Amino acid sequence: MSSLTSPSKNQQKLSTSENESSIRDITHIRVDNSSTPSSSQKFSLPPTEYKNSNVHNAMLKCNQDYVQKSKILMSLLVDTSSILKLVRETNKQRWDLHYPFVGIKSTQTPGLKSSLYNDRNHRSMSKYKQKVNDRLHTPTDMSSSQEFNSKLNVLKLDLKRGDTSSAETVFEDLDKSAIATLLDGRLVQTEKRCESLHARISDTSSKVLVAGDVNAGKSTFVNALLRKEVMPVDQQPCTTLFCEVLDVQENGGIEEIHAIKDITSYKRTDVSTYTVIEWKDLYDTIVNNEESGEYTQLKIYTKDRRNAQESLLHNGVVDIALIDCPGLNRDTLKTTALFARQEEIDVIIFVVSAENHFTLSAKEFLSNASKEKAYLFIVVNRFDNIRHKEKCRRAILEQIKEVSPRTHEYAKDLVHFVTSTSIKIEKDDDNVGNMSHKFNTADQNDNDTKSIEEFSKLEESLRTFVLKKRSKSKLAPAQHYLDNLVTDIGVLIEFNRNIAQQENDKANMKLKEAERAYNKLVSDQKSSVATAEKAETRVCEEIQTFTRNSLEKAIENVGKNVSCEFNGLLYIWGYANDLRDSMLDDIQKEVVASEENAKNKTAQCIKLIQDLGKDLGEVKQVNLDRMYTKPGMSISIDIEISDFIEFDLNEKFSEGLGFAGLAGGAVMCAATRLDALSCLWKLTGFVGFNNMRRLALPLVGLAGFGIVTYILFDAKHVISRKVARKIRGHLKRSDYVNIETNRIVRQGRKKIRKVSDNLRDQFRKAVEEEETKQVAQRISYKKSEEAVKFFEKIFSQTEQVAECLEDFLGNNEWEDYEEIPVSN
């Protein structure tokens, strides 16, 4: 590796590091002398050819300038390839590239015009930024099709359906990833194109392609340039394959023709890679190859006997290859091959018939070639056949202006109206191998003299263009292509930077909204859950209080408002049972009332909790109809004999009266529920018959006394008090109030808890969703932010390439090149 110091005001040492994965600073340019021409290699002038020291020094100066600029240009190509690789990696891995304005309305990209003005005044905008801005800022009077086609040049994607759909319509039907894939393929092609340009510049030779329509006179023109009949000429098209004409010195001084089947494997020193064709068989080989397709190219090594100052091939400065190619509109495959082949060419000489002007295929070819080559050499052949010459000249120049404006600008040097047949051609009787030759010696008139002079001007201009202005002929195409490419990269990058910035702003806004929504949701979650818990506690306490008070009051008042019908002493047992059932029913009614109250309170609480989560999604519904389907605590109280006796008498008579009452009660029970004889028999068996007789009178007396006493004390109220007292005692002992209260509260709490748990679950899911959204927004924000930084970095590096391209290589205006003096 070597270093190179630029002569411009931005001089910096040119260096690089191949181990860096990212693009290096463009002000450090890599130069490899092993792959670039040296001033001591090809540019030493033969002293026998150039004895004038002024010519020698001028040629050396010109060649040294060419060597320096070629090194810089190759370095810029390497840098541009590195930028393309980084863009491709981003396109495949991090950010799908948008094709400018495809699927995006102009109203969606309001910042495109102003995005290049950041922190700068419009007047201080660089030429490169201004150029990119002009591409992005579409004039209001431009149609959508023109807008679509005006954005990119080298990186333009040409895609059409088989119908009449326009390219932008086809792109509108593609999704983002499909367009990114197409762009990736285009970037790959462009990388290879940069590599081929690098190889072409490092090659010290110059390839000159002679192209044109069928029967435009290409072969005749080549023979006129060589002053020798090398290419076969016929009234019918006879050039059916590429024929490359080279100086004989490149084949060891031997004139011969190599017919090549595979050009990629061709080696001049390896006879197995080609077939030597006799000169006399050249015409037949070319004609017959159209059907056989055996060969892909011919290399014709021939000698130009003129001196170095007259010959294009044998010039003593640069190896020149003249390539005669098939006509454009002869064969579709050959035309396609020619379009691809022109990218390997340094200079294009396009031969057009003055009689036919430019055909559609010619215009397409020249338009495609002008994307890389700003200057094309146009030869208007058979001009002598035209009667109205000025009219023809104006018409052709207007057509040239459309396809290649820069060529039209320098039409005086690059566009020539000639007649190739007016030039004397050396013809061999047998073959070029023998030294006997002759010239066509037709009589010359004034028109021929003028045609010869025009052709001489053409030759001088061509030599100047190819040899003296090599930065135009060889470097300018690559520079022009690179200039278009870096502008395209700038347009593509700046457009995507703007899209990324818009997405970044949108993601930032959404992220802030998500954070606000998340914080609000968390706050709502805390307050709502706390409200639900408080509501649950409050309602359960209310249910508990209400139920406890209701049951305690009901138990306390049991028997006070009983209305059971008393049907006499004979039905007093049934009356006691009716009293019990009625009292228990009153308590059960209070239980049901407490349950209804609990339902209402629970429903109100559930409604409150559901309202807290109504914005979170579907509200959980709870069925309260079956809230208390299971019965409460069962109460089992039996009526006993003691329930018919009131023991609350005066103490003095309590025992006697109690016994009497017991006896009377026994007699009454026996009388009402048992058969009298059976009762008497059992009592006799228990006491004994003898004793029974003794006690019969006292017992009968006591029973009578008890009956009288019972009647006196109102058995109806006694039973009511006794049953009520028994029920209260039983319920207190069984902790009935607490058990029933807890049951009712528990069922209400269970229903409320379902809703409150659902509320917590809804909030949890909502918080998780917001967290997921935040993560997605952060990823989107980070991705777009990285894309913006990447595009800004790439744009800056591309701008540096563009500035280097302008500073180091200059404008290369046609007049800037010093003419090399002609030796006498």
Image (spheres, helix red, strand yellow):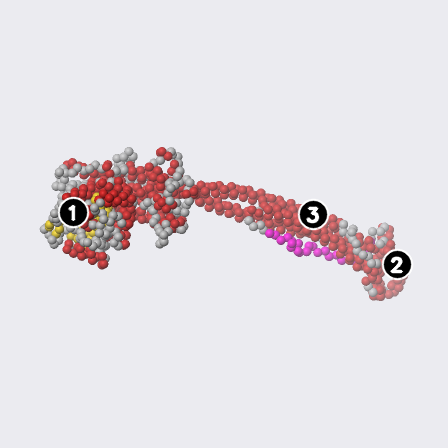
Q: Is residue 508 left or right of residue 136?
A: right
Q: Which residues are magenta?
A: 621-646
Mark 1 near mark 3, Cβ–Cβ under 8 Å?
Answer: no
Instruction: Looking at the picture, tell me which residue is in the foreground, 740 or 802.
Output: 802
Image spot of residue 810 (x, y percent): 27, 37
Q: Kindly report the distance in space between the C-alpha atoms of the residues bearing marks 3 and 2.
A: 51 Å
Instruction: Say which residue appears at 48% left-offset and 46% top-offset.
Output: 773
Label 2, secondary structure: give it: helix
Asked where in the image residue 86 lies, by quadrant, the reply is: top left
| Amino acid type, label 1 | Ser
Residue 348 position within the rendered picture, expressed as x and y whole percent measured from the top left: 24, 46
Of mark 1 and mark 3, the one earlier in the sequence is 1
At 56% from the left and 50% from the top, the residue drawn is: 618
Q: Secondary structure at mark 1?
A: helix
Q: Secondary structure at mark 3?
A: helix
Q: Nearer the viewer, residue 396 or 809?
A: 396
